[in-house]
Amino acid sequence: MTKVAAKKVGMTQIWKEDAVIPVTVLRIEKEGEKELKEGDIVHIRGKSKGKGFQGVVKRHGFHGGPASHGQKHSLRAPGSIGATDPARVIPGQKMAGRMGGENLTVKNVCVEEINFEEKTILVKGPVPGMRGSEVEIHITGLKEEKKEKAETSEPSKKKQEKEEKKKEADNKANEALPAQADKS
């Protein structure tokens, strides 16, 4: 996979075939836009937005304690952090701490449009990081058409054949019914 350095400009939307597609605008910093083509599938790596010091409810999705029945200050507290027997906190326990600011890779993102004059590309969906942050575009060499071919696979063709056979059998049965009604 080849890498192309880019900078996140922001988000917008485009209209294609009566559909609104949310896209992220990336400005390519070096001569790398010639390697990209519309419809390419790419992986985008960047640093996520930093959220600062967060509690366990926001950071790890804990439910928190009950809001009633005598609870006063433990609504968003983590609860128990371990058993009495080891008399210590086991390493890896989910606790409050700094959230975000991690390297993330968004995989299988489609390149929607390329503007060679402005050196910008539009990719479908979100990209990690804030506006102005640097990202790496990893070119996979795959095209969007391959994704569509995988969706129309053999099982769906077999399903269509079964439905056609059912319709033919129903038509034959319907044709036979009026003939029997005329005889009586």
Image (cartoon, rainbow, N blue to C red):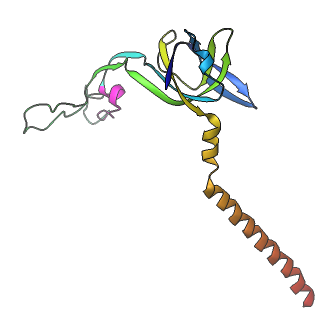
Q: Pinpoint residue 46: horizontal percent, then vertical percent.
A: 45, 19
In front here: 163 or 37? 37
Q: What quarter of the picture does the C terminus occupy?
A: bottom right
Does 171 appear above or below 131? below
Does 152 appear above or below 123? below
* Residue at 48% across, 27% down: 106
Q: Residue furthest right?
A: 182
* Residue at 67% across, 57% down: 157
Q: Pinpoint residue 88: horizontal percent, then vertical percent.
A: 10, 31
In front here: 139 or 58? 139
Magenta highlight range = 56-66
Q: Is residue 75 left or right of residue 135?
A: left
* Residue at 62% across, 13% down: 120
Q: Pinpoint residue 54: horizontal percent, then vertical percent.
A: 32, 20
Q: Residue furthest bottom?
A: 184
Q: Is residue 59 magenta?
A: yes
In front here: 51 or 171? 171
In front here: 79 or 8? 8
User: Picture quarter containing residue 77?
Assistant: top left
User: Picture quarter containing residue 123?
Assistant: top right
* Residue at 54% across, 27% down: 42
Q: Pinpoint residue 135: horizontal percent, then vertical percent.
A: 48, 16
Q: Is residue 86 left or right of residue 145?
A: left
Tag count: 0
Q: Is residue 75 magenta?
A: no
Does 79 appear above or below 32? below
Does 183 appear above or below 86? below
